[in-house]
Every structure is written in C-alpha cells, then in structure tokens.
Amino acid sequence: EPEVTQTPSHQVTQMGQEVILRCVPISNHLYFYWYRQILGQKVEFLVSFYNNEISEKSEIFDDQFSVERPDGSNFTLKIRSTKLEDSAMYFCASRGTGRGYTFGSGTRLTVV
Amino acid sequence: AQTVTQSQPEMSVQEAETVTLSCTYDTSESDYYLFWYKQPPSRQMILVIRQEAYKQQNATENRFSVNFQKAAKSFSLKISDSQLGDAAMYFCASLFGNEKLTFGTGTRLTIIP
C-alpha cells in the first residue's frame, strides 16, 4: 500500500536554528498538508498546499514557517528560527481527488 | 466554527470486552466526512474507520464500528472483542467543506488484561 514518507523521524535542534522537515507524498496525490501535535495535545492544522501554492494556512503558520515542493516529489516544511514552543510532532499528509487522507509517520522535533 | 468534541479523556476496558468512545461535532455543512484515528505510543496516525455523512449505514471495519447519529451530530466508535494491541490514543476527526481535518482532543484507551 502506498505510503507517505517523512524524514527525519526525530530531529533535535538549538533554539534559533533553521530546520527543514521533509515529506514524500503518495505520487498521484494532489493535496498536501502539514499538521502539528504538541505533546499531550490535539493535532492541529498548519497548512494545505495545492497546485504549487498554499491553499489555506492556520494562524499558527506565521512568517517563520514556509512550505515548498521543490522537485515534484518532495514536500518540505521549513521553520526559520525555531523556538522552544515549536517542539512537537509534525505530520505530513496527502490525498488524491477523494477525501481519503494518508498520514506520514511523523517527525518529532525537539528544540533545546 | 466547526468543532469536534471528545468528552472522555480516558477509558479502560477488559480484554475481550466491548468499549464505546464518544465524539460529537458541530457544523452547518451538509457534506462532510468523519474519521477515527488511532495513535499508538509510536505517535503514528493510523486510520481506523471513516464515515461519509451522506451515508445512512454505519461504517464497519472488522471489530470496529461506528454509531453515526447525524441529527444529534454524534459519531461514536465501538471496539468489540478488545485486544491488548488496541491500547492507544483515539482521535475523532472531521473533514468539512474546507478540506482540512479538525481533530478532537483524544481519548486514551487502556486495555486491562
């Protein structure tokens, strides 16, 4: 069964550093998403991406965040200057023309 | 605003017994989808079951079934013959017209051997 692949599985970074979280969505999917889950809290929507542009973003997705689909297969989330409160599990998801989401296994980001 | 509410932070059930997890939602949309996701300690999000709002028949996947009450905006998950591997956080989620998932706060399910 096709999978959404996320790398790395765990990243530790110093506060103020830039991080890039990588995702390879399912190849024929058209819609891509990033979600975030702070430990012990619910999963929150960050951003959706379609046709090479952001289609919707939440209030969490401020200027320190950006997304990119650089080469037609990867989908990246960049956090420019990490803060302690950015520590969370970040999930990538994709879907095709139907409503079925497929989530990746997540990247655990720890900011120290 | 569209919301999803899970009122049970924790539930426990004896192995082989049946447990029901509750979820309510609020929307003015007529076309939407509802999901239950399982999150084990690995924190991966695993789709358990989904329900299309236009379908009256309740979805079933092996030991997992839902009780979808559209008028009451209720979407509960029933797990039959509970197994130790069912222990996890369970999240109810909805997909309304704007295509992004809205999650509840989760229910931690413990299976008692």
Image (cartoon, coloured by chain):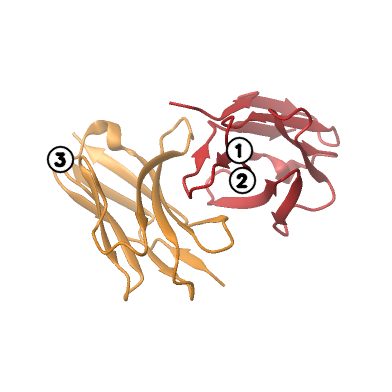
Chain colours: A red, B orange
Give whichever of A7, A72 is nearer the camera.
Answer: A72
Q: Amino acid at mark 2?
A: Tyr
- Name the subunit of mark 2: A
Do residues under tags 1 and 2 come within 8 Å of each other at their CB atoms? Answer: yes
Q: Nearer the viewer, mark 3 or mark 1?
A: 1
> Residue A43 location in percent, x, y?
55, 49
- Name the subunit of mark 3: B
Give whichever of B28, B76 is nearer the camera.
Answer: B28
Q: Amino acid at mark 3?
A: Asp
Asked whether, in this view, residue B98 is left or right of residue A59, the answer is: left
What residue does disc 2 label?
Answer: A35
Packing grade of label 2 (10 A; few <14, some 14-19, many >=20) is many
Residue drawn at (25%, 39%), measured in percent from left and top? B111
> Residue A70 location in percent, x, y?
79, 31
Give whichever of B33, A61 is nearer the camera.
Answer: B33
Q: Amino acid at mark 1?
A: Cys
Packing grade of label 1 (10 A; few <14, some 14-19, many >=20) is many
Distance from label 3 to label 2 (Cα)?
32 Å
* Residue B80, image quadrant: top left
What residue does disc 1 label?
Answer: A92
SS class of the residue under badge 3?
loop
- Name the subunit of mark 1: A
Quadrant of image for the C terminus of chain B: top left
